[in-house]
Amino acid sequence: MSSPTTVQKLAAEALGTFWLVLGGCGTAVFAAKSIAQDDDTGTSFQVGVGFLGVSIAFGLTVLTGVYALGHISGGHFNPAVTVGAALAKRFEWKDVPGYIVVQVIGGLIAGVVILVIAKGKDGFEAEGNMAANGFGDHSPSGYTLLAALIAEVVLTAIFVVVILGATDTRAPAGIAGIAIGLTLTLIHLISIPITNTSVNPARSTAVAFFNGNGAPGQLWLFWLAPILGAVIAGILYPLVFAKGAGEPELDQIPNPPVPT
């Protein structure tokens, strides 16, 4: 069987990131808060999926994306994962810029799709309602810049360690997508109240400019913190858990490879 071409890999990364943003941010925009009304009593009640539903949605996008596209591109769907994989010597540095560019493009296209659909509802205002990440006044629960920084760095580092571990040739075959998807779900359960959860610069960029309301000005943190977390993981994993020379590249690993 021939190896995927560069164009195929880039297309897979763009599509996977598109799916991650559409599935995760789309759930947050359309389904997290939904109000229904009892026709008999006129009482309104919440039927949205809430934080739990959004967390599961993000986990499912990664799980399905890894199994569908991981064998083509490695299934990163996240600039931080790409950088962490390169530092861990699981990915070629020469391919990093191309992956990051198409991840951002794929995410932005998903952001446009979400915005267009959302505007199909009378009264929808994009400002402050596009699932953007933030801290301080723009944090869902008012967490500070320092709290947001620590959360994003630590959670991204853990995420990348799980990815590197689950795709290690010593790991049980076939479980990588499940482990990675469940980890991203747990990360969202922890940090949606803190930052609305990034751990992925492409996801943050995808909706920040459509959301406005301070999100573009705070976007720097959601590039810096996830990349820093990925750097920590990319250096730490080989140092602590290295199996020696001959570690395969991501696209040579038999398990469903790496996402975001």
Image: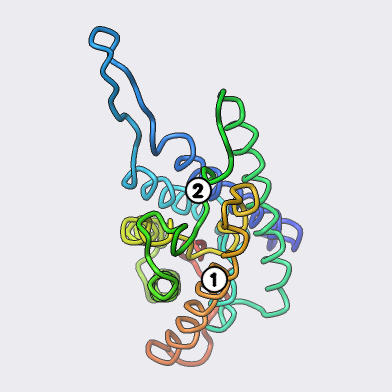
Labelled disc at residue 110: none
Image quadrant in which the N terminus is located:
bottom right
Left or right relative to 100: residue 143: left
Percent position (x, y) of residue 258? 51, 65
Left or right relative to 34: residue 4: right
Dot 2, how many residues are within 10 Å of its Cα: few (below 14), some (14-19), or many (20+)? Answer: many
**How has the structure been colored for display?**
rainbow
SS category of the residue bearing label 2: loop
Left or right relative to 8: residue 178: left
Measured along the vertical axis of the image, is residue 128 above or below residue 238? above
Q: Amino acid at mark 2?
A: Ala
Labelled disc at residue 131: 2
Percent position (x, y) of residue 163? 44, 69
The answer to which image quadrant residue 151 occupies is bottom left
Q: Is residue 169 visible?
A: no
Percent position (x, y) of residue 132? 52, 53
- The residue located at (48%, 47%) in the rendering is 24
The answer to which image quadrant residue 126 occupies is top right
- The residue located at (60%, 25%) in the rendering is 120
- The residue located at (36%, 26%) in the rendering is 35
Q: Amino acid at mark 1?
A: Leu
Measured along the vertical axis of the image, is residue 152 above or below residue 194? below
Instruction: Say which label, 2 or 1, has the lower sequence index.
Output: 2
Q: Which residue is mark 1?
A: 221
Q: Is residue 230 visible?
A: yes
Measured along the vertical axis of the image, is residue 81 above or below residue 53? below
Considering every residue shown, the one lying at the far front of the view is: 137
Q: Between residue 186 and residue 33, name the one nearer to us.
A: 33
